[in-house]
Amino acid sequence: MKRILYIPFDHLHPDFGVLNAADAAADLIVMVESQRMVSGSNWHKVRLYFLISAAMHFAQEMRDRGFTVLYIQAPTTIDGLKEAQQSYPGLPIWSAEPSSHRQFHALKEFGVQYVENDFFLTSRTLFAVWADRQKSYLMENFYRAQRIRLGILVNDGEPEGGRWNFDKENRLPPPKNYSYPAYLVHESDEIDREVASRLGIDPASAWATTRVGARRQLDYFLEHHFPFFGPYEDAMTTENWALHHSLLSPYLNVGLLHPSEVITAALKRYAKGDIPIAGAEGFIRQIIGWREYINGIYWHFDEGFKDRNELGGVRKLLPLLKDSRKTSMNCLQHIVGEIEERAWTHHIPRLMVLSNLALLTGVNPQEFLIWMRENFIDASDWVMVPNVIGMGMHADGGAMMTKPYVSGGSYISKMSDYCKGCAYDPKKRSGDDACPFTTLYWNFLIENRATFSKNHRMAQQLAGIDRLKDVELLQARAVEVLAGLDRGDI
Ligand code: SF4
């Protein structure tokens, strides 16, 4: 053996990262299941199940391809690498650049040598070239540049369908009297059952743990959901936990699928000609736009970005986030319940319900970030830090987004069926049955008016304060709501 190739649990692809140029006769593969990862935080069991089972399956896949693989359980990753070095002394350790700042520094300090991280379509260097030329980091500008650079849905430099952006068509509420395609069930095997039993849960049939299973999910999405993803991507409903979402983010984020595979398959399906451009564009934007942009931003800003708290949020994490029974707000009962069950809900509940609530209540952004990191199956550090600190909680003072994403109950009411059976009324901002989102939205604008007074994108929202006739009542109600949320009984 000439080299140790260290494969983190989010680099599980035989053709990318350090495995790109691996040789079974000369390279020893080492994977480390660290106790720090398993029990160091309050991780959601489904998340741990997915990460460990996918890694163990991948170790087996590489053995089947003729590699010698050491799957080591150790207190920390570094301890595991030391153990591998004791068994194979003198070998240099190589890895693809890790996907988090913390691991990047820790492994580098230990002496691991890096090849470029190519689990994205945009290298960190390439993103920096784009970012350095921007006045503000508008995702839309990045996305258009990506379309042109990658030659996707572009003809002679012009966007397919005549527009870059079909957001207007892609904001439909959930359809009524509608039947969704059946959920794809992923059968468990012996490795899944062993990991699940170790964690004290049942195997999670919503999630695949192999590359074959991830590919099945991709095919299923393209066959049954692709045309409808775009139009309904922002909708929320009690009738179906996945709607037309692809459910591919866990696989993309651990490397079981590479974005190039997803894009190639999606474009091939689109080429059949029966998928409207709005639907196709909505999905492709997520893969080549948002996902790449968020990773680029994570690496473009320094490690201290995750500690920013420009609006000074100090509230403790709300009890309802840890236990969905601690609220009678229908939207949150439902969404947190879904997360408890399968460690996933789509981007709109994450942004416009959970993060919105954390921002409106002044929860400490770092506490909320930890909760998000622990509870989502696809919660890589590079995903959650920009999404929570920059986008969800505006804790970066607007370095990433030009305005905070805040809204009252009216947005949730428009985009979901949650409000129908709720104890609260989304139209009311004061009184016992006022929707907590609506009350807190206005309260937030009033309290932060001076902070945002120079932000022209907030002008319309702030001007609404002057039309309110019940400011005192709503502020009194806001005090009650915040106390009730802290107690976990509202
Ligand atoms: Fe949520 Fe308010 Fe609607 Fe109730 S009324 S479901 S609390 S948005």
Image (tube, rainbow, N blue to C red):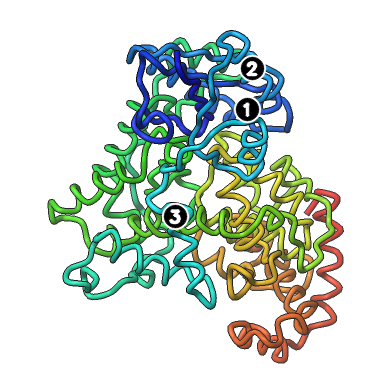
Choose the circle earlier in sequence order: 2 or 1: 1
Q: Where residue 190 sits: x, y (%)?
A: 46, 10
In the rendered image, residue 195, in percent from the top left (x then y), is placed at 56, 16
Give amino acid for label 3: Glu
319 to the left or right of 331: right
Label 2 sits on a secondary structure element that is: loop
Cα separation, mark 2 vs mark 1, equals 8 Å
Please tell me the numbered disc located at residue 45.
1
| Disc 3 and disc 2 in contact, CB within 8 angstroms | no
- Location of the C terminus by quadrant is bottom right
Q: Residue furthest front?
A: 90
Q: In the image, what residue type sits under mark 1?
A: Lys
Mark 2 highlights which residue? Answer: 200
The residue depicted at 68 percent of the width and 20 percent of the height is 79
**Can residue 50 be seen?**
no
**Residue 217: quarter of image:** top left
Q: Label 3: few (<14), some or many (≥20) within 10 Å? A: many
User: Can you say which quadrant of the picture contains the N terminus?
Assistant: top left
Instruction: Name the one closer to the observer, 89 or 454.
Output: 89
Residue at 86% from the left image edge and 67% from the top image edge? 479
Q: CA gap, disc 3 to disc 1? A: 28 Å
Give the amino acid type for the residue marked by disc 2 in the picture: Gly
Q: What number is the disc on residue 292? A: 3
**Disc 2, disc 1: CB below 8 Å?**
yes
- Report whether 239 appears left or right of 354: left
Mark closest to the chain's N terminus, 3 or 1: 1
